[in-house]
Amino acid sequence: MSVTAEVKTGLQTRTHVEGSRRKPSRWRTFKKGIAPWLFISPYIILFLTFTLFPLLFSIFLSFQEWNPVAGLSGMKFVGFYNYTLALTDPWLWKSLYNTVWLAIASGVPQHLIAIPVAYLLVAAVRSGLRHIYTATMFIPFITSTVAIALIFYTIYSSNTGILNQMLVGLSTVPVIGALFSWVPDAMPIRWLSSSALIKPAIAFVVVWKYTGFNIVIYSAGFLTVPKDLYDAAKVDGCNAWQQFWHVALPMIRPFVFFALTLTIIGNLQLFEEPFILTAGDSGGVAQSGLTASYYLYLVGWEWLEMGAAAAISWILFLFIAIATSVHFYFNGRKGLEGHR
């Protein structure tokens, strides 16, 4: 082969290779353009089916009067009537009051207990034991809420509950019996049948279940505090309390902000605890244990007024959004920035 023929053949080969590079194959086009969407399509399908569609349908349903027994053909457009009816219903305002009461009574103690306990676990307990203690305190959070509520339902029993039996036993102890001298006259204490006691009883169950979760969050926060800061505080003459209050606590502001946000959102949606502890009796005596989520359940599934239930759900959503926004307004900047 001549030199000219070899050069021509080489040019043709290079042109063919460059042409193949300029024109990607259909398989490459498929992999780059379509394959990624196929991989995430299960999530997209699930999101559209179980999130976006129910969300849009609930908005549509809030303007309808509908009994699900009648089928979809039984829908009747009523405009803002469901919202007007809900906002003028005393049970809704009663449930919102109970919800706020329980959110505060069960939310504040969680953090007042979790913060010092987490600090002591990090500062005074060896890592091996700390993990065991933290895991033990975390168990109530991962336990079924229904199971916990049922256990406390038996504990709160008026006649056979261990709580009343323990109070009677304490009243007979020689040293501290004087503090419980009122117990025999008050028996049986009806923890779940008294309008004055039912909310504290529910709040205690919520505190018992979620305090361990907050302990885990705050323990992680305290572990991020550099030891050099403690050493510098000791050099400056700070005692243990001052190290906690002026060094450790300001450094975990982002963790406090995060935990408070979860508590606000979660406690304003309480349902299982009041539902089980009141035995599904519309919130117990005088609806003292009726929360907004519980009232929503009654309207939708007991009274079969799905349109009104959808309207109440959006009212509750707006209520939670306002409460969270207020929290973000007052604590967001300090909580997100931390101590600087």
Image (tube, rainbow, N blue to C red):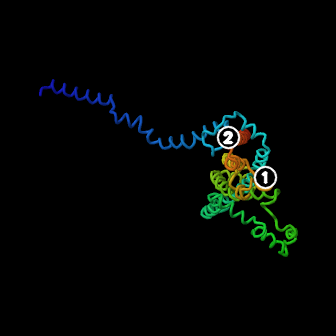
Q: Residue at x 69, y 64 (%)?
A: 151
Crowding near the residue tagged with mark 1, few <14, some 14–19, many ≥20 C-alpha atoms within 10 Å = some
Numbered circle sitting on residue 44: none
Q: Quadrant of residue 77?
A: top right
Determine which residue is flagged by label 2.
307
Q: Count the marks.
A: 2
Q: Is residue 79 above or below residue 176?
A: above
Question: 67 or 144, which lies in front?
Answer: 67
Q: Position of residue 103 (x, y in %)?
A: 74, 50
Evaluate whether residue 237 shows in this view. no
Crowding near the residue tagged with mark 2, few <14, some 14–19, many ≥20 C-alpha atoms within 10 Å = many
Question: 287 or 48, which lies in front?
Answer: 287
What secondary structure is marked by label 2? helix
What secondary structure is marked by label 1? helix
Q: Amino acid at mark 1?
A: Gln
Determine which residue is flagged by label 1.
287
Q: Position of residue 294 (x, y in %)?
A: 71, 50
Q: Is residue 194 above or below residue 60?
A: below
Q: Residue at x 75, y 68 (%)?
A: 161
